Image: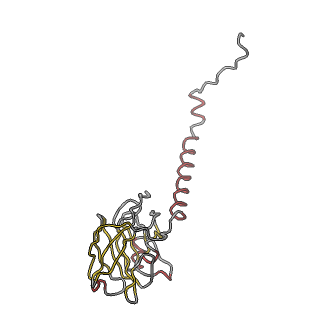
Amino acid sequence: MPGGDRTPARRLTRRALLERWWLLPVAGTAGAFGYMGWYATRVTTGKRTAGTPDFRPATPQRVAALSDLNGEWAEQTFTYAGRPCTALRVPQDVPGALPDGGSFLIAYSRVCTHLGCNVNLVRDPEILAFAFNYRPPREEQHPQLGCRCHYSVFDPLRSGEAVFGKALLPLPRVQLERRGADLWATGIEPAPDFTG
């Protein structure tokens, strides 16, 4: 034969294809389990800490009278810089919190960092266990911020860090300032890209 020795090309016949049909469901199943393993690892070990507050100045706005946030875990919702937010009186210092007497005032954006739903304060740990499938450790039996869309939970005493669910990033914090008898918002951390 001119041009050298050529081996005939192997043709994929219908019979050969039918003999190997089982490869498709096996490959699909292996891919699905691989993705689920990757995603489970991502949502359990990929959560980020809040770090030092990175407040960006925004137009100052009155949030509430300090007397409206009178008792421990008192809450005041408001909108600031176009985002729904919540201010809380908490029993311990949190980076970015404002000291007020023997307790502290902290405010967070209520926009979940997973896909942008609103989070709400969940006061009862049993509701967290039942509705969010999250039971806080014994030393963290305090109100948490929960997202009802995909059941992410954020801890207000850990700078709004995601402690459970699909969200990976902490809630942005709002800078607070006391002006006379009122609480004012004067800055906010940038909104993160959603972690979908």
User: Residue 99 in the image: x percent, y percent?
Assistant: 40, 84
Q: Determine the residue positioned at 32% across, 67% down.
A: 58
153 and 129: which is toward the camera: 153
Quarter of the image where the C terminus is located: bottom left
Number of numbered discs: 0
Establish if 15 lies above or below 55: above
Task: Using residue 106 as the reference point, say whether residue 48 is left or right of it.
Answer: right
User: Residue 34 in the image: x percent, y percent?
Assistant: 56, 52
Q: Determine the residue positioned at 45% across, 82% down.
A: 93
Establish if 14 lies above or below 70: above
Establish if 171 lies above or below 97: above
Q: Determine the residue positioned at 52% across, 56% down.
A: 36
* Residue 38 falls in image quadrant: bottom right
User: Residue 90 in the image: x percent, y percent?
Assistant: 40, 82
118 and 136: which is toward the camera: 118
Quarter of the image where the N terminus is located: top right
Task: Using residue 20 as the reference point, say whether residue 5 is left or right of it.
Answer: right
Task: Using residue 70 as the reference point, say whether residue 195 is left or right of it.
Answer: right
Q: Determine the residue positioned at 56% across, 28% down.
A: 14
Name the image colouring: secondary structure
User: Residue 125 in the image: x percent, y percent?
Assistant: 42, 79
Residue placed furthest toward the bottom:
102
